[in-house]
Image (tube, coloured by chain):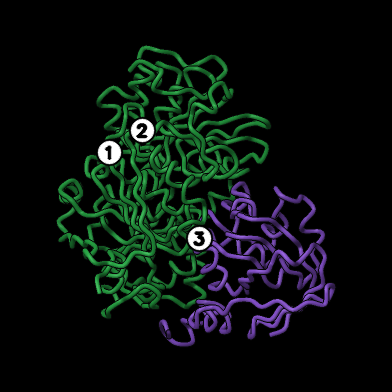
Chain colours: A green, B purple
């Protein structure tokens, strides 16, 4: 019987033939934790009486969620992480390096065919590199530090095929919001999703990461793309590790198959307070906004900042709107600086904050006030997500967010000349 | 193991930000402190209404969102004995088991109302609603999860066996 990408990767890492539904104990290629989850992992590791870290060269911890620290409570937890990294010889990415889900692929820690876990729900992002990667909790991460392994139930897989060319002003974020709206927030629970089709082949690796990042927003365990030349080029520029491209067999068994045509797609927006509450931008025009945010592990990459800069160039954001921008990593920040993107956005009225999770998670760097509307390139718009449960969060592409910042209300990027 | 308490009812899609808001969970490991803020955005008085041993009862996709274990831990420290829901999001499901918070998947969770007195037998998955004199059945968990839960959590499992024992 043919196998899916998930079955092949989990099988290869557990030494048995793994079929959907099986429980396997698998070897982990790379594991990551961030400052919201790692302190609890350290505590769990101590409880497990852990000494040295198993495979310490294949672990990273990242300070990105509250970076730099906004208060003494967080400072104590950051200190705990730094001391742990020093004592155990574990790689640490400290403040300003960037968001974990940009750093792990960008610094060459993932190659096709890998099995990666991270104590953050958006760890599914690395599926864009043809890896099986999934989010876990702190105690699971401590178990990986202790044993180098973790148990999994092999997921069944939904196959989603995208066909057609994206119209101007419509991006991978719009495709994914459309997909999450169609699938709903638990439509892929406990399952893996494979994304493929001619639309995907034309898409950059960065744009694919926007989609794999949001696989968890439909409940999925992983969102995986096939390996192609673009993935191979991305990876070979960053690491000498040998990629193991993994594809589904022609007769692989999928739990469901969907085909989505994108040629007529228009910009999409997720309305408060859930990601699957999706509407076409046309239905929300004139909704006033007080804050616009461009950044995050979903849409804080160079290509995203470039699109925003093209829309903002030579213009000025509407009086009364705050535009906050957080590049997803220091390297992206530097690249954007080099090509003039930062200059363009700041001149248009944008404010830059430290590469990191910024205001997406409500820790600092732009907490909205009561009754305010925010349009953001992030992946979640739950009530209270940005630190105030009386604010309203709309999710959209960087183009839609930039166009909205100019107009002071939710706007259609196709109407802005760029 | 038998648990007894009253039901605190919530709807569908209770995400981890509702369970414990990001503005608290990033800055402390003091779970008793976090426990005072559980479900605060949905019900500011929730914590004061709970008697030790009570249950959270919810609809589908309980615990969607972030991977933070602060969510099940804060519920546990709020003295909730178990969460009963129509379905759970994947990472919360794992985290609850790993930290020793019992969870029950019950398709008929909607039949339970706020304040109903419940008795739960974790090993059989039987839920008895004493207020309505009705019996409901929860789904059986995968054997590895039952084992981890019975041993008190993943840390205890690994200490006892020196690795994963599936």
Q: Which mark is residue A62?
A: none
Which residue is more in the foreground, B47 or B12?
B12
Position of residue B103 relative to residue A245, above or below, is: below
Label 3 to label 1: alpha-carbon separation: 45 Å
Answer yes or no: are tags 2 and 1 on the same subunit.
yes
Q: Residues within 10 Å of mark 1 (few under 14, many from 20)?
A: some
Secondary structure under tag 3 reads helix
Position of residue B123 relative to residue B87, above or below, is: below
Residue pointed to by mark 3: A39
Tell me the subunit letter for badge 3. A
Q: Quadrant of residue B146?
A: bottom right
Label 2 to label 3: alpha-carbon separation: 46 Å
Instruction: Describe residue A15's horizontal placement relative to residue A277 as left or right.
Output: left
Figure quadrant of the N terminus of chain A: bottom left
Instruction: Describe residue B28's horizontal placement relative to residue A293 as left or right.
Output: right
Position of residue A298 relative to residue B33, above or below, is: above
Which residue corresponds to the image point at 49% horizontal and 69% vertical from the top-left? A139
Q: Which mark is residue A164?
A: 1
Answer yes or no: are tags 2 and 3 on the same subunit.
yes
Label 2 to label 1: alpha-carbon separation: 9 Å
Residue pointed to by mark 2: A264
Q: Position of residue A9 (x, y in %)?
A: 27, 68
Figure quadrant of the C terminus of chain A: top left
Tell me the subunit letter for badge 1. A
Dots 2 and 1: beta carbons under 8 Å? yes
Residue reaching furthest right? B131
């Amino acid at each position: 019987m043919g196998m899916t990408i998930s079955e092949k990767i989990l099988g290869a890492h557990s030494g048995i033939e793994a079929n959907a539904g099986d429980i396997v104990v698998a070897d982990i290629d790379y594991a990551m934790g961030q400052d919201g989850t790692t302190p609890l992992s350290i505590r769990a590791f101590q409880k497990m009486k852990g000494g040295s870290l198993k495979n310490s060269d294949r672990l990273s911890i990242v300070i990105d969620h509250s970076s730099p620290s906004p208060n003494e409570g967080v400072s104590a937890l950051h200190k705990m992480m730094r001391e742990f990294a020093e004592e155990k010889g574990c790689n640490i990415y400290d403040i300003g390096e960037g968001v974990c889900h940009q750093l792990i692929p960008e610094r060459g820690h993932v190659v096709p065919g890998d099995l990666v876990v991270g104590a953050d729900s958006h760890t599914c992002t690395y599926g864009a590199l043809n890896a099986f990667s999934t989010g876990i909790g702190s105690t699971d991460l401590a178990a990986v530090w202790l044993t180098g392994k973790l148990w999994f139930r092999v997921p069944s897989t939904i196959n989603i095929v995208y066909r057609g060319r994206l119209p101007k002003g419509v991006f991978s974020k719009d495709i994914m919001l459309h997909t999450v709206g169609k699938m709903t927030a638990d439509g892929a629970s406990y399952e893996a999703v494979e994304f493929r089709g001619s639309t995907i082949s034309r898409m950059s690796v960065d744009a694919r990461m926007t989609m794999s990042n949001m696989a968890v927003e439909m409940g999925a365990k992983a969102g995986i793309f096939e390996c192609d030349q673009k993935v191979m080029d991305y990876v070979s520029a960053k690491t000498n590790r040998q990629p193991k491209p993994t594809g589904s067999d022609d007769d692989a068994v999928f739990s469901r198959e969907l085909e989505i045509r994108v040629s007529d797609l228009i910009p999409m927006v997720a309305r408060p307070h859930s990601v699957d509450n999706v509407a076409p931008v046309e239905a929300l025009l004139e909704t006033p906004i007080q804050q616009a945010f461009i950044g995050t592990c979903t849409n804080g990459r160079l290509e995203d900042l470039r699109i925003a800069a093209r829309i903002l160039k030579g213009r000025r954001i509407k009086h009364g709107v705050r535009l906050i921008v957080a590049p997803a990593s220091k390297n992206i920040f530097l690249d954007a600086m080099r090509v003039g993107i930062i200059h363009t956005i700041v001149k248009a009225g944008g404010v830059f904050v430290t590469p990191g999770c910024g205001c997406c998670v409500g820790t600092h760097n732009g907490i909205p006030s009561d009754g305010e509307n925010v349009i953001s390139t992030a992946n979640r718009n739950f009530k209270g997500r940005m630190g105030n449960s009386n604010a309203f969060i709309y999710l959209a592409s960087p183009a839609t967010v930039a166009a909205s910042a100019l107009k002071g209300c939710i706007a259609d990027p196709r109407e802005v000349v760029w | 193991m038998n648990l007894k308490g009253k039901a605190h009812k919530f709807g569908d899609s209770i995400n981890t930000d509702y369970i414990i808001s990001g503005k608290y969970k990033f800055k402390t490991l003091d779970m008793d402190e976090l426990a005072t803020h559980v479900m605060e955005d949905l019900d500011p008085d929730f914590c004061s209404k709970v008697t030790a041993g009570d249950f959270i009862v919810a609809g589908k996709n309980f615990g969607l969102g972030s991977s933070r274990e602060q969510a099940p831990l804060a519920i546990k420290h709020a003295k909730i004995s178990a969460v009963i829901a129509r379905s759970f999001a994947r990472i919360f499901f794992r985290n609850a088991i790993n930290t020793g918070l019992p969870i029950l998947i019950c398709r008929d969770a909607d039949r339970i109302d706020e304040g109903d007195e419940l008795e739960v037998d974790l090993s059989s998955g039987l839920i008895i609603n004493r207020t309505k004199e009705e019996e409901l059945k929860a789904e059986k968990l995968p054997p590895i999860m039952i084992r981890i839960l019975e041993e008190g959590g993943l840390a205890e499992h690994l200490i006892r066996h020196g690795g994963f024992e599936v």
